[in-house]
Amino acid sequence: MWILNSAHSCCNGMLSSSTIRVPTPAASRLAYARALLAAGIAIALLAYGEVSSADENVIGASLRQPSRLDTGPEVKSIEAILQDPPIHTAVQRLAKDIPRPQTMPATPIDIVINQPDSAIILDQASGLCGDCIGPAGRFWGRAEVLGWWVDGFSVPPLVTTSLAGTARADAGVLGRPGTTVLFGNESLAGDLRLGGRLTVGGWLGSSRQSGVEAIFFGLQSSGSNFAATSAGTPILARPFFNVEPGFEGQDAELAAFPGELSGNISVRSETKLYGLEVLYRHKLSQEWPRRVDLVAGWRYAQLEDDLLITDSKEVLSGATGLAVGTTLSEFDHFHTKNIFHGAEVGMIYERWWCQWGIEGVIKVALGNTHSEALINGSTTVSVPVPGGPNETIVTPAGLLAQASNIGTRERDDFAVIPELGMNVGYDLTPNLRATVGYTFIYWSRVARPGDQIDTNLNLSQLPPGPLVGIPSPVASWSITDMWVQGISAGIDYRF
């Protein structure tokens, strides 16, 4: 059997080997070699028009000559075959008549002949791939478009309604017949959003053993929005749990009620997420076409969430105890920010198949998350005054944001951010590659705005007071985790 491994160019200028296997009878090895060599010489001579009738007879006789291997196991080398008189004469004529090409650099070829199988192996050119590690280029940049889903934050029921004809005391109250949650009791800001990721880096030497890399990503600011307006029907309300002594139980603040109040309620949420990595990259192992790198460095991440609840209402009748035409507007604002700084370590695995390649990434960052939670609110009451301008009163408290929990709080927690990623690339040119991939990132300790909401309210603390019982809502930390995952598509350029 002859085995021919022919080196060919691919994979950004790298060489790989393809193998052609031609099984032949062991007893005819010399006959095949002799016939193929003679035929090749004949074709070459014909191409140059240098074959005479005598040459044809000589070569033909050589081709027709029976193989001596048919009667014994004798094995002759190719050099011995070339010394046979008919073949030797044809080779000398060919060597004299064929024009000499220009001098070209010699390419070493590994030739291994194994006996007794006579396996002739022509392997890849040595010296061309021995020191090459990874795709071509000393510097690289990758720009990607992201389509990622962010883990949303949970909120309690924020807006309710009730069936027409519901008594005022039961309107919008959770657990009462006919009450429906219009908004809340769900996860917000967890939709798909677009973003971008930019990677730049370079090797510190031509051997590409070590390098540095910086990665930045950011997602489009996005969230959830809700708005409802009513002239009195349907009923609109904001539910809570009343802890004022003597009034304990589920309760609701009305924004619209038939014949008494007209109004609106809106809720807006927003999430921002971005991060930065600066990494040192060093080769752990390399055996073409595979490479494993160790990465180590610093990771920064920032997550911001915002939740704003507003309502406005106008008094339609004196049944409320307020002057007709009085307007009340209030808002509750919950904002959280989380900033992570930590040390990161991981590995990157790369594998190439000519124009195709894959990249697997696993990293984990250990560090500190600094969390901030801001709660504030306000209520503005405008009372009409006959014959004069309206009287306006502003109170620094809303419904869920009151004096007992308004303010800014901070804390620090040990946190872990692992990341898993996979990319598939295809070389459009030796320097330009198109990529698609998937990324999953987890963040172990973060503060989200919905978790900072306390729906237990003691309304007696509102002006003019006095407070009866314990102040509520209270400011208490609630820490959770979050994740982000999605797909990417980009262009990788190396130079």
Image (cartoon, helix red, strand yellow):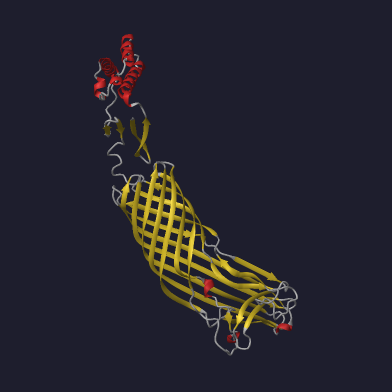
How many callouts does the rendering have? 0
Q: In which quarter of the image is residue 180?
A: bottom right
Q: In which quarter of the image is residue 353?
A: top left
Expressed as whole percent of the image width and height from the top left, the position of residue 267 reads 60, 69
**Farthest residue toward the front?**
71
Q: In which quarter of the image is residue 19?
A: top left
Expressed as whole percent of the image width and height from the top left, the position of residue 193 reads 53, 58
Residue at 55% in and 69% down = 154
The one nearer the camera, 11 or 397, is 11
Q: Quick one: quadrant of the N terminus?
A: top left
The one nearer the camera, 223 or 286, is 286
The vertical placement of 487 against 305, above or below, is above
The one nearer the camera, 119 or 386, is 119
Q: In the rendered image, is residue 263 in sight?
A: no
Relative side of 468 to 176, left or right: left
Q: In the rendered image, is residue 470 in sight?
A: yes
Relative side of 85 to 487, left or right: left
Expressed as whole percent of the image width and height from the top left, the position of residue 234 reads 72, 71
The vertical placement of 390 against 307, above or below, is below
**Farthest residue toward the top?**
53
Expressed as whole percent of the image width and height from the top left, the position of residue 409 reads 46, 77
Relative side of 369 to 64, left or right: right
Residue at 52% in and 73% down = 451
Relative side of 7 to 444, left or right: left
The vertical placement of 389 against 61, above or below, is below
The vertical placement of 273 against 243, above or below, is above
Residue at 42% in and 51% down = 142
